[in-house]
Image (tube, rainbow, N blue to C red):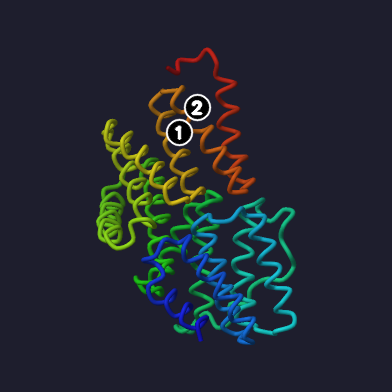
Amino acid sequence: QMAQLNLNFTNAVGHLEWFHAGVQRLRVCFDSALSSGNAEIGFFCAVQLVNYSIISGEKELTSLLKDIDYYLHLLETYKDEVSKNFLLSSRETVSMLIDKGEATSIEAKEYLGDVTDPGNIILDTFYCHQVLRNFWLGYGERCRHFAKKGFARIPQGKYFFHIIKFYYGLSLLDMTKKKLNSARQKEVEEIIESMKVAVEHADSNIRNKLELLQAELHGLGARHNEAVALYNAAIASAKKSKFIHEQGLACERAGLYYKKMGCARDALVHFQQAHACYKEWGSNVKVGAIQRELDGFNNSIGTNFI
């Protein structure tokens, strides 16, 4: 009964609670459910636990992958196909974040079922994970494509909704940096306004995301002082919330901004911080991307950077 109550709480208002606290709650929920013989509830808790771990950066990715494989191993006995599909979707995301699946992928893949069914919750999760995978791998167009599909299906109260909105907003800004577009910029401004509302209810989960979107927008508008202050705020907020991956992201974005402005020393410091965060997170993909930025500094000694 306690496991069921914890799961109901997470599904209803879990997005308002600090994501790391949700992870701890769901771990207890999983253990309690399995020890009491309620495997179905237990594995629903495991599914949510893994999702929370991914979006919060709560656990180093290779360790999280081992946890998912452990749950999948248990499901060979318990035969819960719905939970298995959810976990396979999460596993694919973690594998892609670690090394694009080069050494961590497995043959088994999630089964999406009837993609025309409006009640297909596995498809909802699939879209969310596609947003995460494609954003972190740098596939902006695909990130935006799946985000729009997710917005059409996922209620605003679900914890994944603002996560998708955040990455979608950053992807829009990336596109706008390449070619100014007033419609895209207006859409980002609308996302920021919605984030301002969300932060009033879930400060620990949303503040760093709001600040990073604002920093990027100010940088786009050549408002240097505001951009710098908000990059610093986003880094600090992500660190406070222990979102190591988003701390790395804020450092990376600040580094790219300083690089564009010709401020080599500040750019280098922030790329080094991003490298450390991504290494702690366990994403070889992002560590490699930042290392290439750092290598670029080694090759640019004597240029006109300041």
Question: In front: 181, or 173?
Answer: 173
Residue 88, x across and y down, in percent: 64, 70
Report the side of 238 relative to 215 (left or right): right
Spatial separation of the CA atoms under disc 1 and disc 2: 7 Å
Horizontally, residue 18 falls left or right of residue 180, namely right
Identity, as a three-letter code, of the amino acid under mark 1: Gly
Q: In front here: 18 or 66?
A: 18
The amino acid beneath tag 2 is: Leu
Q: Residue at x 74, y 54 (%)?
A: 103
Residue at 46 percent across and 22 percent down: it is 265
Q: Looking at the picture, does residue 277 appear above or below residue 142?
A: above
Q: Secondary structure at mark 2?
A: helix
Task: Determine whether 291 is above or below 25 in the image.
Answer: above
- Circle 2 packing at 10 Å, graded few (<14), some (14-19), many (20+), is many
Crowd tier of the residue under label 1, counting other residues whose Cα lies within 10 Å: few below 14, some 14–19, many 20 or above = many
Tell me the residue at 59%/21% (across/down).
Answer: 298
Identify the residue at horizontal 37%, vertical 73% (top origin): 13
Q: Image quadrant for the C terminus?
A: top left
* Residue matched to label 2: 268
Residue at the limit of the structure toward the top, as seen here: 302
The circle on residue 255 is 1
The picture places residue 44, in percent across and down from the top left corner, at: 56, 78
Q: At which x and y percent is residue 225? A: 27, 31
C-beta proximity under 8 Å, tags 1 and 2? yes
